[in-house]
Amino acid sequence: MVPPAATAQTPDIGQRRGEDWGAFLGPTGNGRSSLRELRAPWPDRGPPVVWHCAVGEGYCAPAVALGRAVVFDRIGQDMRLRCLEAETGRKLWEERYPAAYTDMFGYDGGPRAAPVIARDRVISFGPEGRLECRSLADGTSDWKIDTAREYHVVQNFFGVGAAPLVVDAGDGPVVVVQVGGSRPGSAPPAPERLDLVKGLDSGLVAFDLATGRERWRAADQLASYSGPILARIGDRDRILAWTRDALLVVDPATGAVEGAFRWRADEVFSAVCASPVADDSRVLLSECYGPGSVLLDLAAGGDPRPLRQDRRNARPTAALKAHWATPVLHEENLYGISGRNSGDAVLACVDWKTGAVRWVEGGFGRASLVLVAGHLLVLGEYGDLALVRTVSDRYVEVSRTRLRDPADGRTDLLAPPCWAAPVIARGLGYVRGQGRLVCLDLGEQ
């Protein structure tokens, strides 16, 4: 991945030091923070609220780097990208463009894909398919592409939702996105019948970070909501992109597809949402509509080889069936939310190698979580925030709270649905609910 780097045009304006979180699920794309000095347990009111601000429609997390927090949302008939001072919430710049997205299932019309900060630029990918690169310093647009028009994309169930991935392709960085284009005129008679749509050659497309020029395209797959990741397989970096039907193993320099593995439910109205979880040459895929999880071996090259998979039709308490929140791996255990619906979703600890469920805990709904200093920071979809120790034999809750407005001590700051993954950058945590983004001080007192 290409981390942000301060330049003369984009200096680091932060006062705190530590790890930035400019990409979806953090600098390594696996939901793991390097913060070691964690405030635990929390005071009765939870970790201190540093600042909070109103946000519009949308479900995506911010990107935080170089002392800036970039927030993507929708206000009325405009998509809005704001750059805030990460430590104070003060607005640095704001840019808008006319919104052109309507959700076919009635969810809100805001962005789903988190923005990405790479070097001195920020990349946004709107739900209607507008991919845009802007200056992180002042929001000036460098280039933009209407991927829906250019690649004849038939709208996915919930629009575009997979965050971009910026990687070094050998002769400069590229922005890799799930496009999922098809042949002109291939729209089905009913918009939701994606099973009738066939991909062409743009399942995954790489664009030059500096110019927006297409560098390569790969695969005849439709797009999913799973963010592609960069993984080290043996002595090579490879992109792992879980598209609508299959996991692709792709050379970041050329776009050559070196292996593929089909994994999704047979149900038409199903969606692949969680990102792959990689550890050396082994990769886990997890979904909630049908087959659940599979652990794959990529060491031999070619098509991935399954090592284990969940028992068919297993309940969420007996397997790891991730919906949209990507599980995290820690000391040979996976921690994640298992279950398709709010009522049956549980927080689960699962053995990485065998898939055996070690423990489950309900009460969070379809939560999101990240790993920090031997703990899970868990954001429940109804606004509960919890700190849970990563132990394999039992559920150990260190703290749980509902964040209140410091001005009155009573008003809840997080309203459901809280579906964005938490972000941790330089000791500050960023959590989003409906209508509000909250910045917390997670560092040690």
Image (spheres, rainbow, N blue to C red):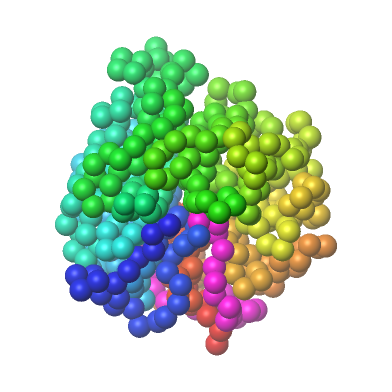
- Quadrant (top left/top right/bottom left/bottom right) for the N terminus: bottom left
Residue 395 x, y percent position in the rendering:
77, 63
Please say whether residue 52 is one of the residues in the magenta stretch. Answer: yes
Q: Which residues are magenta?
A: 29-55
Counting every numbered tag in the picture gives: 0
Residue 57 x, y percent position in the rendering:
36, 48
Q: Residue at x 41, y 32 (%)?
A: 218
Q: Residue at x 19, y 70 (%)?
A: 9
Q: Nearer the viewer, residue 47 or 39?
A: 39
In the displayed structure, 159 sits above or below 352; it is above
Residue 343 seen anywhere in this rendered image of the structure: no
Please say whether residue 117 is one of the residues in the magenta stretch. Answer: no
Position of residue 355 in the picture relative to residue 405 (left or right): right
Q: Nearer the viewer, residue 188 or 244?
A: 244
Residue 291 x, y percent position in the rendering:
69, 32
- Quadrant (top left/top right/bottom left/bottom right) for the C terminus: bottom right
Q: Residue at x 37, y 50 (%)?
A: 169
Q: Residue at x 33, y 45 (%)?
A: 125
Q: Quadrant of residue 120?
A: bottom left
Secondary structure, magenta segment, majority class: loop
Residue 46 x, y percent position in the rendering:
57, 75
Q: Nearer the viewer, residue 66 or 247?
A: 247
In the displayed structure, 115 sits above or below 119; it is above
Residue 220 seen anywhere in this rendered image of the structure: yes
Residue closest to the far bottom: 445
In the displayed structure, 399 sits above or below 157; it is below
In the displayed structure, 440 sits above or below 415; it is below
Q: Quadrant of residue 41?
A: bottom right
Position of residue 233 in the picture relative to residue 404 (left or right): right
Q: Quadrant of residue 17?
A: bottom left
Position of residue 381 in the picture relative to residue 146 (left or right): right
